[in-house]
Amino acid sequence: MWSSFFKASTAILAATLSMPVLSHAQGVAMTAEQSDPKALGWMLGAPPPADKIIRFSDPDYFSFPKMRWTVCHFRQLMPTVGVSRGLGAPKPLTREIDATIDGLTFTPTGAATLMTWAQSLSANYTDGIVVLHDGKVVYERYSGCLDEAGQHGAMSVTKSLTGLLGEMLVAEGKLDETAKVATIMPELAKSAFGDATVRQVLDMTTGLRYSEDYADPNADVWTYSAAGNPLPKPADYKGPQSYFEYLKTVAKQGEHGVAFGYKTINTDALGWIIARISGKSVADLLSERIWSRMGAEQDAYYTVDSIGTPFAGGGLNAGLRDIARIGQLLLDDGVVGGERLVPEAAINSIRGGGDKAAFEKAGYANLPGWSYRGMWWVSHNAHGAYMARGVHGQSIYIDPAARMVIARFSSHPTAGNAANDPTTLPAFEAVAEHLMKKP
């Protein structure tokens, strides 16, 4: 019983981790077109045929190709909490479509053959992508489960928004980045987080005993996921009942501040810190400080655990253009329509990047010279580009030199971004170079 329960309950968590974890689709030959959820008939009909129904309790509900439907429909599967866009009118995005972008070519990393931008969309199982240049929409495409009115799981892009909220509180003097976590969260005093600083949590340089090895049935990730599962626990379940309860059990391994280690529990710890400092959940604070003030088109939402705690590490779902608006907000130094939403110091902190030496120890071969700061991935390339990244290809890519933002939702069959980076990163750079040449 425990095996099937854990497998079903951890699918949503596995979907949010930007690590080289493979989905069940490893080796599957279905193309983006062949695996289109409409073509496969998932959840179509009233009711759908029995063999086309997807439920959260199904152990394969987030396995390829089902997950190509699931990424757009989390609120049909599990409890959620809203992120209100407020009552004002959306801020319109001017459109100046550049029809030449589809034909742009680039060479994927490690390849010898050119690929076009249009070909890269299918190669990366793109559900939706929008390119902004100087705040104007120059490219927009939808496929798979997504259209312009739909919403999609942002996966670990969520972490970057949690990190942004944390950086805002630091910049405003409400959160001391040098403070030990235990001084803010006494509940975590006996955990590994207790003697870590807020900055070490923000930059994921904490020393935590936490395994995300899905091949190991005893890995910590299974217990963490079971704690966050909103479904009723089995009668013999003795573990933590919520994200908060689990965080109190995390043991220390190694020293804080030495090496970057990408672990989702850092973001959930930060989400708890933010809630304690602000008096609001990350969902409510995101709405109050950003979503209701940036001119969003749609409400967003978070998946939640059994006590209604938003999944700060990966639970955000939103419309694509609103995700692009987040990128544009940062590109515009935190200002929308003359109103400052994000302190300049918070954006400067993120853009400046983190400890490159600490990041290098994590062994991201596709990201040489990068760093991690405030839960954003910083390239340190000639354009100063930085990203929010989520498994299966979720992205916000901000290129200050090109005045470009790319927002993408995808459902790539392989979870880890190592599978799509060789195509994604040179494709994004090719568009940036193209836009910089425009008059």
Image (cartoon, rainbow, N blue to C red):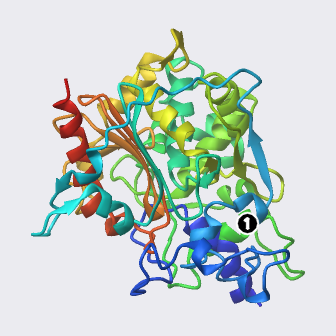
For label 1, the residue is 227
Q: Seen in the image, is 298 located left or right of residue 163? A: right
**Front-most of residues 234 and 132:** 132
In the rendered image, the residue lying farthest to the right is: 235
* Crowding near the residue tagged with mark 1, few <14, some 14–19, many ≥20 C-alpha atoms within 10 Å: many
In the rendered image, the residue lying farthest to the left is: 112
How many numbered discs, if any? 1
Q: Residue at x 51, y 38 (%)?
A: 163
- The quarter of the picture where the N terminus appears is bottom right
Q: Seen in the image, is 349 located left or right of residue 410? A: left
Where residue 408 sits in the image (x, y, percent)? 45, 50
Q: Seen in the image, is 231 located left or right of residue 178? A: right
Q: Is residue 11 visible?
A: yes
Q: Is residue 103 above or below residue 49?
A: above
Where residue 320 sits in the image (x, y, percent)? 54, 45
- The quarter of the picture where the C terminus appears is top left
Q: Seen in the image, is 347 located left or right of residue 112? A: right
Q: Is residue 67 visible?
A: no
Q: Quadrant of residue 165?
A: top right
Q: Is residue 314 above or below residue 17?
A: above
Where residue 57 sits in the image (x, y, percent)? 77, 78
Q: Residue at x 24, y 60 (%)?
A: 366
